[in-house]
Amino acid sequence: MSEAILKQIEGNTAILTMNNPPANTWTAESLQLLASMVEELNQDKDIYALVITGQGEKFFSAGADLNLFADGDKGNAASMAKHFGHAFETLSAFRGVSIAAINGYAMGGGLEVALACDIRIAESQAQMALPEATVGLLPCAGGTQNLTALVGEGWAKRMILCGERIGAEKAEQIGLVEEVVEQGQALDAAVALAAKVARQSPSSVTVCKTLIQAGRTMPRTQALPLERELFIGLFDTEDQAEGVNAFLEKRKPNWKNC
């Protein structure tokens, strides 16, 4: 199962490629593998960003294999829901910046893994949907919450309740993806964007990401004092002094990520 997700390191970026042809569907084993890979990357101070994409030219990921749910076994459903939730919540909590390079169809759990990332870049031919209700299911890996946070209730309801599939251009218009590129260019664009993260203080990126995501659930009256608290906390890190002094000395900072 080590081949279900391919890992490549390019500079300070880890590239994870879903590799379960023909549609890069998720299994319990590959979901556990994703979670463990992200946890390992969290411990690697040289990794500042993560890019996830799909093997091949047609599919980013088609989500779960529906054969897993054909027998109506609730125990199996509970197990898969747990694996999906743990894997994608671990990805969402990655301490660096995560970018989805959507290189084809992103359906169901395939779109949900992209929704768990910080940024999404889609190729022009990409198609996206959360069609679970069409087969009597629901998107249980963060889809109802993450999609709504990105595009608002109206479009979330169109995609989930009406089963509406959208293309890359519409996805960009509604805020589901941040950029659309030509076919075959998503990975390069994502890696180029990820390289910019290395210019930022890893310590700062981690706390800024925490604050941005806290805005989904935390009232501003709590988030604003937390923002000031975490700002002061950065002065306990080596990166704070290194960043300020590197700027004043007109040199490139040497981040310690601590």
Image (cartoon, grey):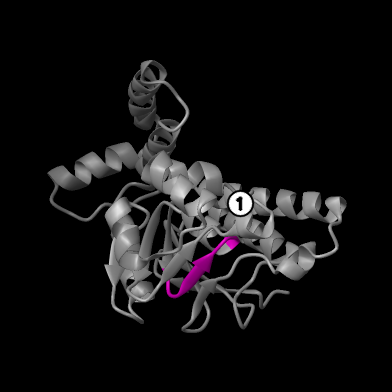
Q: Which residue is drawn at 54% across and 49% down?
A: 143
Mark 1 crowd level (few <14, some 14–19, many ≥20, 10 Å Cα): some
Where's residue 155, x and y in %? 40, 48
Residue 191 picture quarter: bottom left
Could you tell me how many numbered marks the image carries? 1
Residue 219 lies in the magenta stretch: no
Residue at x 84%, y 57% (from the top left corner): 72
Residue at coordinates 58% horizontally, 57% vertically from top-left? 38
Q: Where is residue 242 in the image (x, y as percent from the top left)?
A: 28, 43
- Residue 13 picture location, percent across and down: 42, 65
Residue 106 within the segment the image draws in magenta: yes
Q: Give the range drawn in magenta.
A: 102-109
Residue beneath disc 1: 139
| Residue 217 in the figure: left or right of residue 178 | right
In this orientation, does residue 116 appear?
A: no
Residue 120 is left or right of residue 192, and the answer is right
Residue displayed at 45% across by 47% down: 156
| Picture layout, residue 6 above or below residue 129 | below
Query: Which of the 4 image quarters holds residue 32?
Result: bottom right
Q: Where is residue 255 in the image (x, y as percent from the top left)?
A: 35, 50
Q: Which of 221 and 23 is in front in this view?
A: 23
- Residue 77, placed above or below residue 203: below
Considering the numbered disc 1 on the image, is that residue within a helix, a strand or a loop? loop
Q: Can residue 84 be seen in this view?
A: yes
Mark 1: amino acid: Pro
Relative to 90, say whether 132 is above or below: below
